[in-house]
Image: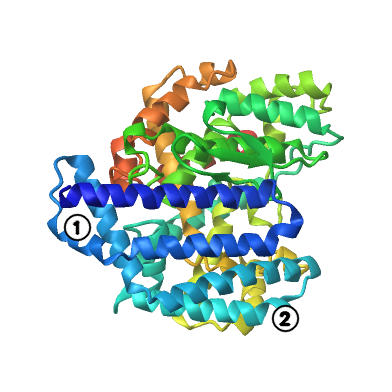
Amino acid sequence: MNAMQALVAHERQTRALAQVMERLGWDQETMMPRGATAQRAEEMGALEAVLHARRTDPRIGEWLAAAAPQDEAGRAFLRHARRAFERHSRVPADLAEELARTTSIAQGIWAEARARDDVAHFLPVLDRVLALKRSEARALAQGGDAYDALLDDYEPGASAAGIGAMFDRMRPRLVALRAAVLAVPNPPARLKGEFHREGQLRLARLLSETFGYDFARGRLDLAVHPFSSGSGSDVRITTRVDETDPFNCLYSTIHEVGHAAYEQGIDPAFALTPMGQGVSMGVHESQSRIYENQLGRSRAFTGWLFERMRAEFGDLGLGGPDHFHATVNRVSPGYIRTEADEVQYNLHIMMRFDLERALIAGDLAVGDLEAAWNDRFLADFGVAVDRPANGMLQDVHWSVGLFGYFPTYSLGNVYAGCLMQALRLERPELDAELAAGDLSGATGWLREKVQVHGGLMEPRATIAAACGFDPHEGPLLDYLDAKYRALYGLQ
Ligand code: ZN
């Protein structure tokens, strides 16, 4: 075996083991008996140790030095492998282990603190997580920007400076649009009533199939927080049911189908290689968002969904499909990021981005975080946070050490805006298809332009190649303006 073949074989087994770990993680959130928590932590820890040893195996360095790629895929393979090896080698093993241990404990403490609205219960462990992440960031950055080093794990090639500048361009238009929308005297009605669980799950399955999810290589189960997991030929999704809010189930499902369709759509030749999974969190989120929002919440598609919902639940008490479309896209003040509408979502992210950058830079102490959060929320949203579960305790991310992750949600929205603009130009028949519940044109385009490539290109290059232009925030902002001004009868 030459160096390239040895590297590929080693990587293949490491990735197969990582997939086993994903399956364990999926099981933990869906099927695992409650009493198995401690044993599962040990099982995961044992696998993690095996993975870490494989990822830092010194032979990788030798193979990398000697490997000669034959084609574009080979060059992409080496680029990913080199980058991963360098990053894994920069973090001392004891720090990696301490981080894994502390974040698994911190997640439980965060959940308790959130349930009890008890910030003081969470602060000591958050302080510990932050200290470890700052050490990790310094080790990774090697003198460069610490926050950028963390961001690089989720969105290779992105920088805090670039994202900050993009947010500065987005904010004024989003704030102006929100002010105009919220000033409209008779906003769309909420959906009221009870919507039985069986009906919601039947529709969730129908929507999954409609958006091209392949049940032969996946399955749909229930979880507290919807997620998708796995790559290649085993990509699973989860949803949840709230009998008073069917949109929660239906749109969470479409969102996760977007993530899963990306993984299912990657060229099978890339399976168990670094190109065999979504290239970045931002590009991943572009797929879930365009499925959920630009396609799933469009006037054309909601017209089709309106009829399906009436067939399942009877009269919805909303009048016709135009009212239904307005209800699905209703803008209202709220504390919670995950429940935010398309107009306000990115404002939630901007606030987290600034706060976590200050935490990593050492400019904001954990003890001052709650006050900083509440001040910022009041300034940005005009509402005082009523309790910590609606404030700084609402998101799991920081407890598990995900600093640098939040901005990828907004990058996903921006990329989705670019993709939608290109898709509309190339498929003038799109609205007619969506109105008939036929998503195959849109999802086929996304598969061919984005999904099939997996990690072959860098994240921004993936979007640029699909759209034919360098991604920027303009298309998203234009789309939001046009959609919400029409919905709210403005200008
Ligand atoms: Zn997502």
Which amino acid type is shown beneath numbered disc 1?
A: Trp
Which residue type does callout 2 highlight? Answer: Ala
Residue 30, disc: none
Of the pair 418 and 244, the residue shown nearer to us? 244
Residue that sits furthest to the right in the current view: 193
Corner quadrant of residue 267: top left
Give the CA distance from mark 2 to mark 1: 49 Å
Q: Is residue 177 above or below residue 41?
A: above
Depth check, front residue: 183 or 13 = 13
Q: Quadrant of residue 388?
A: bottom right
Q: Look at 57% across and 66% down and name the residue there.
A: 400
Asked whether residue 405 appears in the rendered view, the answer is: no
In x, y percent, where is residue 333?
71, 54
Q: Quadrant of residue 448?
A: top left
Q: According to the image, label 2 marks what residue?
A: 120
Which of these two is toward me, 52 or 325? Answer: 52
In the image, residue 367 above or below residue 42: below
**Pointer 2 or 1: first along the chain:** 1
Q: Nearer the viewer, mark 2 or mark 1?
A: 1
What residue is shown with label 1?
63
Instruction: Tell me where residue 311 appears, x and y as whole percent.
Output: 77, 18
Query: What residue is at 75 percent from the left and 31 percent from the top?
Result: 200
Q: Is residue 216 visible?
A: yes
